[in-house]
Image: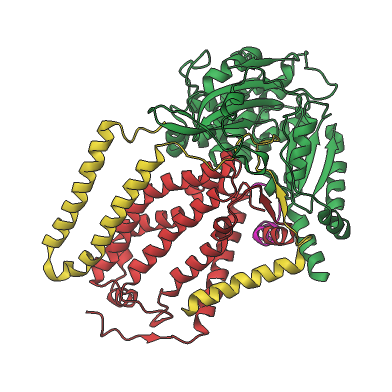
Amino acid sequence: MGLSGRLAALSLQRVHVLPVEVPGWWTTRVALEAQVRARGWTLAESPADADALVICGDVGTALRDPVQLVWDQLPSPRARAAVTDPTGVDAGLDAVAAGLCDVRAQKSSAASRVPQLPDGSEGDMDHGDMDHGDMDHGDMDMAPSGIPLASGAPDRDGLEMDVLQVPLGPVLVHWPAGLLLRCTLAGDVVTSAEAQLLRGGDLGPRTEQPSGTERAARSLDAASSVLALTGWSDPAGTAQRLRDRLVVDPPAEPASLIPDVEALRRQVTRSRMLRWTLRRTGPASGALATGSDVYARLLALLDDATAHLRGDLPSPDLDPASALEGLCDAVTGLELAAVRLVVASLDLRTDRLPAEAVLHG
Amino acid sequence: MGDSAVAAVTSSWWAPALVAAWLLVLALGAACLDAVLATRGHGLPVGRRAAAPLQEAARLLHQQRRTTMQADTLLWRVTGPGLVVAAVLMVAIVPWGHQVVADLDVGVVWFNAMDVTVWAFVWLAGWGPNSAHALIGGYRFLALALGYELPLMFALTAPAVGAGSLRLLDIAQAQDHLWFVAWMPVAFLVYCVGVLGFSVSGPFSTPAGADVSGGVLAETS
Amino acid sequence: MWAALWASVLIALAYGVYRLTTVSVQRHEVLPFQSGWSPSQHALSRFHARWYPLTLVFLAFDVEMLFRYPGSLVVAVVGPSAVIEMFVFLGALLLAVLWAWREGALRWV
């Protein structure tokens, strides 16, 4: 129908893309975000919001099931692309646009979709000493659609409040690639967590030292994640643009971008609202609770970016292995959104971790 | 009191349609302005940026609807239409010159009552989908709303005290010589903040924020 | 009221456009978003207790709002004593909130 086709054409001007980053393909994901912005498209916040799923990297076995589940959650019209190289991003997005344009094919595929069923097992994740098995034995008879109701556990006041198990990652925006954090929530407060790293296909963890430009871009990426999660999209967009510039089209003189980074830092420090929001939101306990909250870490990330661009050697990066170990303690007692802020501010370089990193909290 | 106000109450059946249409135009204008301001520096032409709300509307109309498993369907689906109805009812009592579509003796109270119904609808939007992220977003709105509720109420009673009446026509009449905003600017500022609050926008947009995967909008398609 | 009727007409119009232009009228049923995993429990549950005092505080101040509105009508006639009485009422409520705060009932996380 003419109206349907016209709406499809109009909606093609602003496609919502949900990126899935496999550890090791960071530059591909950055190239994807740069292309998405250049086309006037935008990044999706959740599968319901998304029109297209673009997988950056080789999915492999561990990530295949979550990605498939999320793919099924996208409403029609939808398109899917897999990109393994920054140079292939353009072609991938063109394929996405072509797929969304084909209204007839979208209608027929939409008609053939079946309701998504919960699966009993959760893939090949090992959750041997997770205690949620004890929790839902009691009310297996009350399990609408095969999923049990939440059962209770004492909360901080001694009342019995329901407990939810909510996994965070790996398919989550502004989240380190491949990180799976299984949180046990009482309401929206995390009472315990378990961290795990899911690896993708063949590209192993990078061992060579990345260049100063790339490290600056990584710091800017983490800073933009923190700013985007707080909801302040202006400086988040600025940080993303600077990051894209450094990765996709590196300037001959990296130090030429230092004034822009410093302007961004000034904009961030001028905001009292941001300081109120992020002050004292920090790792609650454990090795990572060195007294620095998300606000201090955000400023440190911007300072690190400046230092890398200048060619200085700033403070060493947080060792990802030890950061992962301290993560479970760090997030216990925090609210769910605070967990996401803390994880974003830690700037975990998950592609530099050895394989088989499974840690319990 | 207020009976001497010269007013033409247009209680015909087609007048509210004008109100609804006018509200739509204003909402679209505000959304387009917001889109242009939010995408500064993206390098796209202004016209393309301003068309973002229309592109989004087209995308959402064209998209398939989804529902989640064991969602509370009635309560969830009531939120969208409910918000539109509340908005139209809120605007229907606002006078335009000496004309008003619905003349209520307690117009200010009605206005406040309609913006309190937003509490119910936004929270139900978080409750309906049976999703953890949405639920957290809905409860977040309650915490924020408690913050703006009392100041907004003060800001709404200030013009009522100034005019000695709760009827919006009387309040408009009482400003014939000098607008209230000139000598009650703080009330106006607080009212503007309250508008941001009950429209879940600006600093109050966290119930639908990125850090809870879209919050109350996490499962809406 | 006609306004509510026209609002409903607007919504019906939007729904009609949707029905004509969507790719599929059938609603797609999915699991709630859990970053790629199947949910372990239903999310609709007894939430953290700190939201209950929040609701009660809202109720208290909403009723206080209810008393302010007629009060605002008589201020011009009765004078400042009406304003003082309204603020005394508000003060009494705030005193109760202050007590609850000191008792730790409003402790957040």
> Where does residue B147 sit, x and y in percent of width and height?
37, 47
Q: Is residue B107 above or below residue A258?
A: below
Whether residue C57 can be seen here: yes
Residue A202 magenta-highlighted: no
> Where does residue B89 sit, x and y in percent of width and height?
46, 71
Residue B49 magenta-highlighted: yes
Q: Nearer the viewer, residue A44 or A212?
A: A44
Q: Is residue C4 above or below residue A170?
A: below
Chain B shown in which color? red
Is residue A265 rendered to the left or right of residue A16?
A: left
Image quadrant holding the N terminus of chain B, namely bottom left
Residue pictured at 35% horizontal, 41% vertical: C53
Chain corresponding to yellow in the figure: C
> Where does residue B125 sit, x and y in percent of width and height?
54, 52
Q: Nearer the viewer, residue B80 or B28?
A: B80
Magenta stretch?
A: B41-54
Report which quarter residue C31 is drawn in: top right
Whether residue A306 can be seen here: no
Q: Is residue B116 above or below residue B135?
A: below
